[in-house]
Image (spheres, helix red, strand yellow):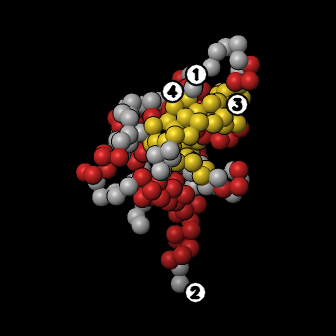
Amino acid sequence: MEIFKLIPPQDPRVQTLVAPFSDDMLKDTDIKDRKELSDKMFKTMNKYSGLGLSANQCGLPFRMFVMGDNLLLENRRKITAFNPKIIPKLATDLRYKEQILMKEGCLTFPFLFLNISRPRIVEVEYEDIDGKLIKEDLDGMFSRIFQHEYDHMQGIVFTDRVSKLKLDMAKKKQMKMVKEYAKKVGNHMSEGGKKS
């Protein structure tokens, strides 16, 4: 099974609200069903060492994402979310009020990391690969990843959630990391080409 290609951040599909998913949307593709789409999305996400991946990051017009499947996250729990929703809570509902500031990355923006404040706990709703409606509370990293991927469904990228100053500072660090990586890969490639 091949993987999907990630589209660049300048592609307008990354910042476009995604319409609700229905199974008949797959009939015009070479993807036979939700399970095959999910499997290919997880394979793509894992190839790039991600914790979550939205269909629109691959240029696909589907309101769905995958997340998890990592040894460090809830025993490799995997979620495939079709038509995801975050259930709004009243400000008086203290259980959902706590905010956590944490560094995030995004496969659309390699080597860019930003401190983003998000609710620690969210109540979510989504359809799984069988079309079954799931409603649950997510806490910690699963909550954060779900919120990040849900933002993609709304046409929001994580760079939209910080000030221009913080983004500019992070982009400077990103360029430094890209140069270090290119140098490392360049050295590795030249070492591989040497004859003994």
Disc 4 + disc 3, Cβ < 8 Å: no
Local SS, label 1: loop
Using a 10 Å C-alpha cutoff, classify the residue at mark 4 as few (fewer than 14 neighbours), some (14 to 19) or many (20 or more). few
Residue at 54%, 75% in the rendered image: 192
Amino acid at the residue labelled 4: Asp
Q: Is residue 73 left or right of residue 108?
A: right
Amino acid at the residue labelled 3: Arg
Dot 3 or dot 2: first in sequence order is: 3
Dot 1 or dot 2: first in sequence order is: 1
Quarter of the figure that contains the N terminus:
bottom left
For discs 4 and 2, the disc positioned in front in the rendered view? 4
Mark 2, residue position: 196
Residue at 60%, 52% in the rendered image: 78
Using a 10 Å C-alpha cutoff, classify the residue at mark 1 as few (fewer than 14 neighbours), some (14 to 19) or many (20 or more). few
Cα–Cα span, label 4 and label 2: 51 Å
Local SS, label 4: helix
Mark 4, residue position: 160
Cα–Cα span, label 1 and label 2: 64 Å
Mark 1, residue position: 88
Q: Which mark is residue 49?
A: none
Disc 1 + disc 4, Cβ < 8 Å: no
Cα–Cα span, label 1 and label 4: 20 Å
Amino acid at the residue labelled 1: Pro
Mark 3, residue position: 120
Counting from the top left corner in percent of width and height, residue 21 is at 38, 40
Question: Is residue 6 positioned above or below 2 on the image?
Answer: above
Residue at 64%, 15% in the rendered image: 90
Local SS, label 3: loop
Question: Is residue 138 positioned above or below 79 on the image?
Answer: above
Residue at 30%, 45% in the rendered image: 25
